[in-house]
């Protein structure tokens, strides 16, 4: 207590830190001794879109001074890119999907930066867990280069092309990787639930840089663990110095105070360590040392064993318990002195009192517990009838452990570097084992296949192989579950969701006003204007469908891509009923006041008029009079959530 009133500035900084952890930094005083937290106003302004992006790094440092931060060329452009809105859309592809009408899973093809932007409305704060296995930047793998002027156009130009690698010879080797990862991790944080977590696989090449940017984006206080996964079971003897046998998995929470670790399932070996040497009625127990360091005088006292021997804590250490706490546990028969009553005291821990949901996980994950790369490769090869399409896929058991630790039975799991779709496979398998209903969202760039033998098998890009992997894995798991007959199925109807809806990133479905009048005559200009005006009477671009438009609207209005959609007809006009009456939409032309009025009758009873969404095209009204009357009808019924496209 310093005798001063509440430090409101510190409170405000903590609130800003909770929302924008990357905008709060540590700053030293002139002597470099006292460290305080300050808001980086320039970075905060960038996040709000109210500041120009500095291009000269020296000028930036001179203006804002030296402070504890992680800087690289292009960082502020990467931050600003995460703030930009996407003009794209996700087009539905029912023919490439599995169980389109019933599944709750998604497979999205496209640049994950643009996809993450498009998911910000519908999935904001909805994802319980994210797992990603991004490029490790080894000098041999692809690192996508974003175009900060028009990243969507950049993606469309590069779709299904052979991707270039990020060579170690590049002068921007680490910079390219950081600029790719930063905006994606920033957008991903927005999608997490308040208690959500993210797991990121990485190796030695970028683990230090990854931890730096995660500390900034998620907040160093929300760091959970840096897990070591034993990915190899045998050494590579040709290595000059060491044979790498592990990768890392960084784990961060959106809010570590809210995240709950459910633990790993208890094993028989772990339970066998518990015995009942004194026939305690509370059941089996194990014991642990009660000495701890460093030495604290209040917890340093002699203990007399039942045999009469005086025991002191080891040199430099003290007892874990205060004298009173020790006496309480002694009275409750929770102190063990050995079978002869002459041993150093140990505290009893009963199996029945341990966490019910599992054991606390350790930060070293052995391949004997979660699999290794070679085994994962072999199992995936077996799934594809002996053909190997993926190098170094992650084991299903590894991803399943991540999912089990922090998700619930109905959680959504996102993987936006989904590769071979091990995460989707893991979700389906875990659902089958635990009779749960977790959902997955896979996002993957459709990297072109260059291997002729793979192309001859009918796969032109990575996404096509990954989707087939999900189909085969789901079918295999379903067959195994049917054989077990463990109550998961009613008759022959499977309850296990093995399907997925496919969506592909594309430009908007709505026609743009595109006209060039420079250098033309007055007559030509008039003709061009007339032509463009007539074009706008047709809302959709050539080759686009009403279903394309519907899902674009759903995304922009914050409805999930798995929301139920049903077609209805009113006097020959097609109506889309969304979410069983949460929204109605129609893009048909020349609808009358009466027909649009009938659309409103589809509003579900559980939806308030002010929450009911109505979507119409500007060309939907039969006349100006119909439009005027319809608008009055909306007002009378309290319907305010109306979109006219």
Image (spheres, helix red, strand yellow):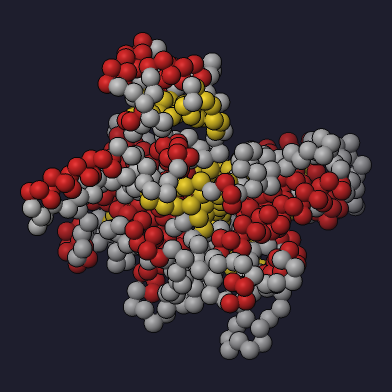
Q: Where is residue 446 in the image (x, y as percent from the top left)?
A: 50, 62
Task: Choose between 373 and 256: the one closer to the eye.
Answer: 373
Q: Residue furthest left?
A: 522
The one of 89 and 149 positioned closer to us in this rendering: 89
- Camera sees residue 180: yes
Residue shown at the point (74%, 52%) measured from the top left: 475
Q: Can residue 345 be seen in this view?
A: no
Q: Taking 204 as reference, is 513 left or right?
A: left
Residue drawn 19% across the image and 42% down it? 530
Location of residue 46 in the rendering, given as x and y in whole percent from the top left corner: 26, 50
Residue depicted at 66% across the width and 59% down the height: 469
157 left or right, relative to 293: left
Query: Which quarter of the rendering shows the N terminus?
Result: top left
Q: Name the outermost residue toward the right.
A: 279
Q: Against 633, is 308 above or below? A: below
Above or below, comparing residue 125 to residue 613 in the picture: below
Query: As rendered, which of 106 and 368 lies closer to the eye?
Result: 106
Q: Which residue is at the far top?
A: 636
**Count of picture labels:** 0
Is residue 590 rendered to the left or right of residue 457?
left
342 lies left or right of 601: right
Q: Where is residue 19 in the image (x, y as percent from the top left)?
A: 38, 41
If the image is split into quadrants, where does the C terminus sit?
Answer: top left
Instruction: Tell me the residue at 47%/66% (across/down).
Output: 160
User: Depth check: 13 or 305 in front?
Assistant: 13
């Amino acid at each position: 207590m310093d005798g001063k009133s509440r430090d409101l500035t510190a409170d405000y900084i903590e609130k800003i830190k909770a929302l924008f952890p990357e905008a709060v930094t540590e700053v030293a005083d002139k002597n470099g001794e006292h460290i305080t937290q300050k808001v980086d106003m320039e970075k905060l302004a960038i996040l709000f879109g109210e500041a120009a992006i500095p291009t000269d790094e020296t000028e930036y440092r001179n203006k804002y001074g030296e402070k504890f931060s992680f800087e690289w060329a292009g960082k502020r452009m990467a931050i600003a890119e995460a703030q930009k809105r996407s003009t794209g859309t996700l087009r539905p592809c029912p023919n490439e999907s599995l169980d389109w009408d019933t599944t709750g899973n998604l497979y999205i093809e496209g640049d994950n930066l643009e996809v993450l932007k498009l998911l910000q409305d519908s999935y904001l704060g909805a994802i319980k867990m994210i797992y990603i296995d991004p490029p490790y930047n080894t000098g041999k793998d692809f690192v996508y280069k974003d175009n900060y002027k028009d990243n969507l156009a950049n993606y469309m130009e590069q779709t299904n092309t052979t991707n270039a690698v990020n060579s170690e010879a590049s002068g921007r080797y680490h910079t390219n990787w950081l600029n790719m990862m930063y905006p994606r991790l920033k957008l991903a944080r927005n999608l997490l639930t308040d208690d959500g977590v993210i797991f990121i696989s990485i190796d030695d090449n970028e683990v230090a840089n990854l931890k730096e940017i995660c500390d900034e984006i998620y907040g160093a206080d929300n760091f959970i663990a840096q897990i070591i996964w034993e990915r190899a079971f045998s050494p590579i003897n040709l290595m000059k110095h060491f044979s790498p046998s592990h990768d890392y998995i960084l784990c961060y929470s959106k809010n570590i105070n809210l995240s709950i670790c459910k633990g790993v399932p208890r094993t028989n070996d772990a339970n066998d360590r518990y015995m009942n040497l004194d026939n305690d009625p509370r059941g089996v127990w194990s014991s642990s040392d009660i000495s701890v360091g460093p030495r604290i005088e209040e917890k340093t006292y002699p203990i007399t064993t039942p045999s009469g021997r005086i025991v002191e804590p080891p040199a430099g250490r003290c007892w874990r318990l205060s004298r009173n706490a020790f006496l309480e546990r002694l009275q409750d028969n929770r102190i063990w002195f050995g079978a002869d009553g002459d041993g150093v005291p140990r505290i009893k821990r009963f199996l029945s009192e341990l966490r019910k949901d599992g054991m606390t996980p350790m930060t070293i994950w052995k391949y004997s517990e979660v699999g290794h790369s070679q085994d994962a490769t072999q199992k995936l090869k077996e799934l594809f009838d002996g053909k190997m399409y993926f190098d170094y896929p992650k084991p299903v058991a590894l991803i399943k452990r991540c999912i089990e630790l922090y998700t619930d039975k109905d959680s959504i799991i996102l993987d936006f570097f989904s590769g071979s779709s091990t995460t989707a496979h893991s979700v389906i398998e875990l659902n089958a084992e635990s009779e749960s209903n977790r959902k997955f969202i896979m996002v993957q760039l459709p990297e072109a296949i260059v291997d002729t033998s793979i192309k001859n098998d009918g796969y032109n890009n990575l996404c096509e192989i990954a989707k087939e992997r999900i189909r085969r894995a789901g079918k295999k798991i379903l067959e195994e579950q049917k054989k077990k007959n463990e109550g998961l199925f009613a008759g022959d109807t499977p309850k296990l969701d093995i399907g997925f809806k496919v969506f592909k990133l594309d430009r908007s479905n709505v026609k743009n006003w595109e006209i060039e009048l420079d250098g033309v005559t007055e007559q030509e200009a008039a003709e061009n204007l007339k032509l463009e005006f007539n074009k706008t009477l047709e809302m959709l671009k050539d080759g686009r469908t009403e279903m394309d438009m519907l899902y674009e609207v759903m995304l922009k209005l914050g409805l999930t891509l798995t929301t139920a959609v049903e077609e209805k007809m009113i006097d020959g006009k097609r109506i889309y009923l969304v979410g069983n009456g949460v929204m109605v939409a129609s893009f048909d032309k020349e609808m009358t006041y009466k027909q649009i009025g009938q659309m409103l009758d589809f509003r579900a009873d559980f939806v308030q008029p002010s929450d009911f969404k109505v979507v119409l095209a500007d060309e939907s009204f039969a006349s100006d009079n119909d439009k005027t009357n319809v608008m009055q009808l909306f007002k009378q019924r309290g319907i305010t959530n109306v979109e006219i496209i």
